[in-house]
Image (spheres, rainbow, N blue to C red):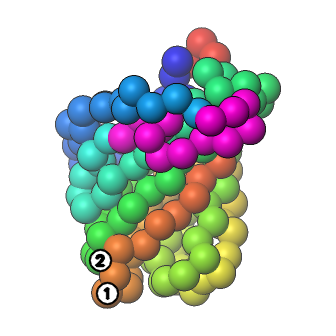
Amino acid sequence: MLLSVVLFCGGAPGSGKGQRSNAQPRNQFLFRFGDMITESAPPGELIHILGGESHGFESLSFVISETKPNGGPPLHRHLCEEAHVLLAGRVKYTIGHETFVAEAPYVVRIPAGACHSFENLGDKTNKRYRSIPQESGE
């Protein structure tokens, strides 16, 4: 199962090691963190991945990112579009040649192929929810 191809625009990719819990979902509609793959993603980020294909979704996968203050990934891009949702906090985004600060609550649209990065500007770890289309063959 491959959720998304990440193409780094600068800097080095992380060396996160995927771990999956043996927990099973209670039913076909409810999924808990224990049902997700968890990886460390530098700098200062922990990601939880729910691959849609293996959980009954036809076209979506989900990522929950826990980003420490001043943390966030280097400039990178994906071959698919994605949406970021944050309910509390402030995050600085660079998408293409534009840089801006988003104050929660918000949804940020990142077009397919756009180089982007983000940084948690708050003083607490934030949780950002991402929805991405399932991809095959990437």
**x and y percent of residue 84 in the render?**
61, 61
Q: Amino acid at mark 2?
A: Pro
Total residue callouts: 2
In percent of the image, x 59 and y 53: which residue is there? 130
Q: Which residues are magenta?
A: 26-38
Q: Secondary structure at mark 2?
A: loop
Residue 14 locus on image (x, y percent): 24, 41
Is residue 22 inside the magenta stretch? no
**Extreme residue toward the right, this view:** 58
Residue at 36% over, 65% down: 67
The amino acid beneath tag 1 is: Asp
Q: Residue farthest to the front?
A: 26
Judged left or right of residue 77, residue 60 is right
Magenta region, main secondary structure: loop
Q: Are marks 2 and 1 in contact (CB under 8 Å)?
A: yes
Vertical relation: 48 (above or below) 118: above
Q: Is residue 27 magenta?
A: yes
Which residue is the site of mark 1?
123
Instruction: Name the residue located 31 percent from the left edge and 31 percent from the top edge.
Output: 18
Quadrant where the C terminus is found in the figure: top right
Question: Closer to the camera, 103 or 116?
Answer: 103
Lower sequence index among marks 2 and 1: 2
Question: What is the C-alpha distance between the residues marked 2 and 1?
Answer: 5 Å
Please give the residue where the numbered disc 2 appears in the rendered image: 69
